[in-house]
Amino acid sequence: MSPKSLRTLTLRFTSREFQYTLWAIFLYVLVTWLTSFMKLTDTSGLDLRPSVTIPMVFGFLCGPWVGFLGGFLGNLTSDTLMYGSALVDWQWSFGMGLVGLVPGLYALKPRSYRSIADQFKALLVASLGLALGMGFASFYAMWICREGSTLQSCYVIPTTFRDALYNSFIPAMRVNMICTVLLLPILLFNVDRLSLRPEDWRSGLLRRLLVTLLVSAALPTLLMGFFLTQRFSHEAADPSILYQIVGTLIATILFTAANAGMLAQSFSRPLLRLIDAAREMKSGKLDRERAEKLRDRPGHDEIAELSQTFGTMALEVMAREQTLRQQVEELKIEIDEAKRQKQVSDIVDTDFFRDLKSKAAQLRSRQSTESKKTGE
């Protein structure tokens, strides 16, 4: 990646950030609705919400404003559409905004999320934001959730600090940390490499990798879903279990397809760059700037080493070509000078030139004699 410079947090909200915020809100609402069936009976009625990672990812990649507004307005919108309790339970929406704000503040200095160390740091920052957001929502509820409260956010009645800690904060942290640990590293790793340019999806290798990954991951998932569906469909159990299995199956396949596509592109895109550079080098159109980018590509894997080697080789070839052109130019000058000397020599060595030279000497001698006589 190119050298990064420290950005500053300002009140300016650009049109691009506005677009990213709309995408964050849309994805948060959509994922929350699709996964609303994931009830965990041991967490005080809380849902398992994979959507908690969306404001985190947008915060890491787009900055604090997008992270905060994506989480706050996304949760506010989803609560309004699904429960009609957005304004009453605003503290949970504000807490979700804090979940996206903290990663955004961390990303004021643009970073990469490709190495294990980068992933671990991002996970720690996301956990801090999650603790801050869930802490605000839980302990604020301690003051508004009294006995007899009808607020839907009051799953229990946290009239004391202990109640808020053990019956609200810890369950919410446990549920959301599950999704964060499972999804955030994968999303950051792949989105950091994602390219939406059409030319980056034309690779035959990408298609083969995508099909291989989908078959390898989707087939076992489908078989497991089929057997589980058969198992529970013949029992007089809660039908929501069957819905959970089907919903989880569909979500898993969609996630597998998206993850496989981004993973396959992470392999094929640098190879496409190398192919384009090789074609340009063949036609003599590869410039030094692009060769330097290939040489300085970060990473220690085989593809990165191939890019670095090709970039170094291209620069060496360019240097040799430049030296060769200079030598050819110098040789051309020497040849032209030799030609001129030979042409002069050919003229001087002729009888005509010698005769002409003799006549010119005689003429100068005669003129000199006449000048002396005239002077006398």
Image: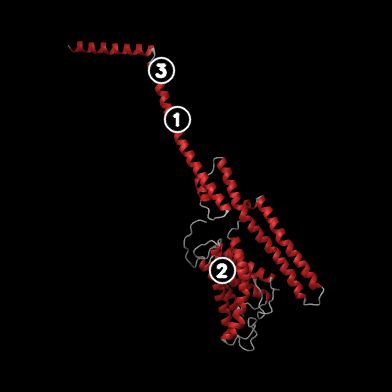
The residue that disc 1 covers is 332
Toward the left, the furthest residue is 376
Where residue 196 sits: x, y (%)? 62, 56
Image point 65% across, 72% down: which residue?
49
Where residue 107 sits: x, y (%)? 52, 65
- Dot 1, how many residues are within 10 Å of its Cα: few (below 14), some (14-19), or many (20+)? few
Q: Amino acid at mark 3?
A: Asp
The residue that disc 2 covers is 123
Q: Amino acid at mark 1?
A: Lys
Marks 1 and 3: CB-CB under 8 Å? no
Q: Earlier in the sequence, mark 1 or mark 2?
A: 2
Q: Earlier in the sequence, mark 1 or mark 3?
A: 1
Secondary structure, mark 1, is helix
The residue that disc 3 covers is 346
| Front position in the image: 321 or 285 | 321
Kindly report which numbered mark, 1 or 2, lies closer to the viewer in this rendering. 2
Image quadrant containing the C terminus: top left
Q: CA distance from mark 1 to mark 2?
A: 64 Å
Is residue 168 visible to the viewer in this orientation of the structure? yes
Task: Decide: is 351 above or below 3.
Answer: above
| Front position in the image: 282 or 303 | 303
